[in-house]
Each structure stands twice: as structure tokens, then as C-alpha cells.
Amino acid sequence: QVQLVESGGGLVQAGGSLRLSCAASSGTFSNYAVGWFRQAPGKEREFVSSIGWSSGGDTTIYADPVKGRFTISKDNAKNTVHLQMNNLKPEDTAVYYCAGRSTGGEVANTARKYTYWGQGTQVTVSP
């Protein structure tokens, strides 16, 4: 079983950057796909990005609103997944959650396909 801990959230002005981290406090990411989701007040949780693996290397997918601004990456040696967020906008304000799924490392953009969840980290972007 994997336990996930997010960090790196905070308050930033529009146009700024933050780097979120998702660390596996137990278990390992080596056989897992990891996704980032976010939930703004009064809204449903939505997909942000996911990273998986295959024999050909890592696979990444992004939601349209963050394409070109966010980059997901994985550090297997440190059992950590990062989400680099650049050119942040007020509409990016939300609690960001990382999640893990163990089905062979295949990426997914649906929350119900993930088994393990972190506690979330708040990202606030001011105008």
C-alpha cells in the first residue's frame, strides 16, 4: 500500500510559479501511475495531469486548461512526483491532490481509477 503526502502549495500572484511534490511515505512509485487532481470551492474534483510508465518510457497526459503551463515529472530514486506550475492564473486556485493507481503504470484522467490519495495542498493564485 502506498501513502502519499503532497507539499509545495501556497499563495502566489498571477503569472507566478509553484512546484508541487507528491512523496510516497511508504511503498514505491515504481509500479504506479500518479495523477494530480484539483478541487475548487463549490466545484467537482477535476483532473490535472498524470504520469505513468511503460517499456518505452514515461507517459504523461494533461488537462487542456493546463497544457503548456504545467509539467509533471517523476523522480524514482526519491519516490516523488512533481508538478511544476508556471504562468498560474486565478482559476488555478484549488486544493491539489495527488493519487496513485497500480494497474501496470497506465495513466488515467478519471478519479475513480485511482486507489490511493494524499491529503491535498492548497494553491491560491491572486489576481
Image (cartoon, rainbow, N blue to C red):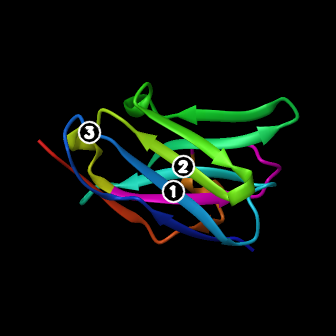
Task: Residue at the far top: name it.
Answer: 68
Q: Residue at coordinates 43% horizontally, 24% vertically from top-left?
A: 68
Q: Is residue 84 above or below residue 114?
A: above
Mark-to-mark CA distance, 2 and 3? 17 Å
The N terminus: image quadrant? bottom right
Q: Name the residue rendered at 65%, 55% in the picture.
A: 113
**Nearer to us in this view, 110 or 24:** 24
Which amino acid, mark 2?
A: His
Res. 121 image quadrant: bottom left
The answer to whether mark 2 and mark 3 are in CB contact below 8 A is no
Q: Bounds of the magenta span?
A: 95-109
Residue 21's disc number: 1
- Tell whether position 25 is magenta: no
Q: Which residue is mark 3?
A: 16
- Above or below for 108 versus 65: below
In magenta stretch: residue 105: yes
User: How packed is label 1: few (under 14 Cα within 10 Å), some, or many (20 or more)?
Assistant: many
Camera sees residue 107: no
